[in-house]
Image: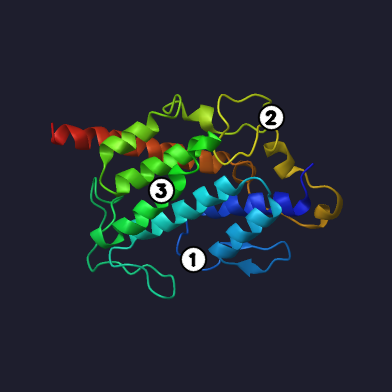
Amino acid sequence: MSTPKERHYWSQLRSALTAGHWDTPFPAKALNGTNISWPELFRKFNKHCRGYGDIAEVGRQVQALALLVQAKEGVGEDGKIRTREGARLVVDEECLVLEEHREEVKAGYDILQSLQSSKFDQIHLTLAYHAYALGDPSLCVAHLESVPELLQFQNHIPNSGSTKSSTQGLLAPSVNYAPSTTSFSGSFSSVVDTTPMEIRDGRAWAMAETMRSICLKGSSYGWNLIFL
């Protein structure tokens, strides 16, 4: 049986990741309504959602990489992205990092590799994102091909009404957890969570991750063809 704090921080983590406001200083709220930072969100998630540290780490690495991908001139001390003057999105380049950030991305990649034993599909999707950002499309594709039926993205979206799943789901701790994220009972009944159902149960983030991975895979194949 999950606790009110457990349900709350699952919802907050999923909401923050789905929103994608990577440089916002306060992406989530504590149970008492206080604004909390990204590091504090991950800390509270780990504290109250025991046993899912790999999921928190995936979220941490996605947020860190997203900042570096967007930061054409780096991230300021205030956490805000400083973009290069006249910077724009360019096909095949918008998900790459600048040379000075490669060591940071490689460090994140190594951390994620150490989590692969958990058999958590999203680790491969995040590893693929890192590989692409490092300019290695072949490695990106290799990670994506480790995920069964990637193109059938509906199979990777947790179904709160299902008791079976072909995978462990994306950001779903188990096939039986999703329903409890929307079960407001006991002391939690006084807390109003207006987060849409598809965000609370992880479906929105699962779809975003899957669609991004499909795009990276297609781009990687095109990138490889250029050098054949």
| Mark sitting earlier along the chain (3/1) | 1
Residue type, numbered disc 3:
Asp
- Residue 109: horizontal and vertical position, in percent? 39, 48
- Residue 52: horizontal and vertical position, in percent? 62, 45
Residue that badge 3 annotates = 110
The quadrant in which residue 79 appears is bottom left
Name the disc covering residue 24, or none.
1
Q: Residue at x 46, y 56 (%)?
A: 63
Q: Is residue 120 visible?
A: no
Q: Residue at x 40, y 48 (%)?
A: 110
Q: Nearer the viewer, mark 3 or mark 1?
A: 3
The quadrant in which residue 97 appears is bottom left
Note whether 195 is above or below 227 in the view shown. Answer: below
Residue that badge 2 annotates = 161
**Is 15 left, or right, of 32 in this rendering?**
left
Residue type, numbered disc 1:
Thr
- Residue 49: horizontal and vertical position, in percent? 68, 50
Q: Quadrant of the C terminus?
A: top left
Note whether 199 is above or below 72 in the view shown. Answer: above
Q: Is residue 135 visible?
A: yes
- Residue 205: horizontal and vertical position, in percent? 52, 43
| Mark sitting earlier along the chain (3/2) | 3
Q: Are marks 1 and 2 in contact (CB under 8 Å)?
A: no
Q: Quadrant of the N terminus?
A: top right
Q: Residues within 10 Å of mark 3 (few under 14, many from 20)?
A: few
Q: Secondary structure at mark 2?
A: loop
Residue type, numbered disc 2:
Gly
Q: Determine the CA span between mark 3 and mark 2.
A: 35 Å
| Mark sitting earlier along the chain (1/2) | 1
List the single residue furthest toward the right.
Answer: 186
Q: Residue at x 35, y 52 (%)?
A: 106
Q: Secondary structure at mark 3?
A: helix
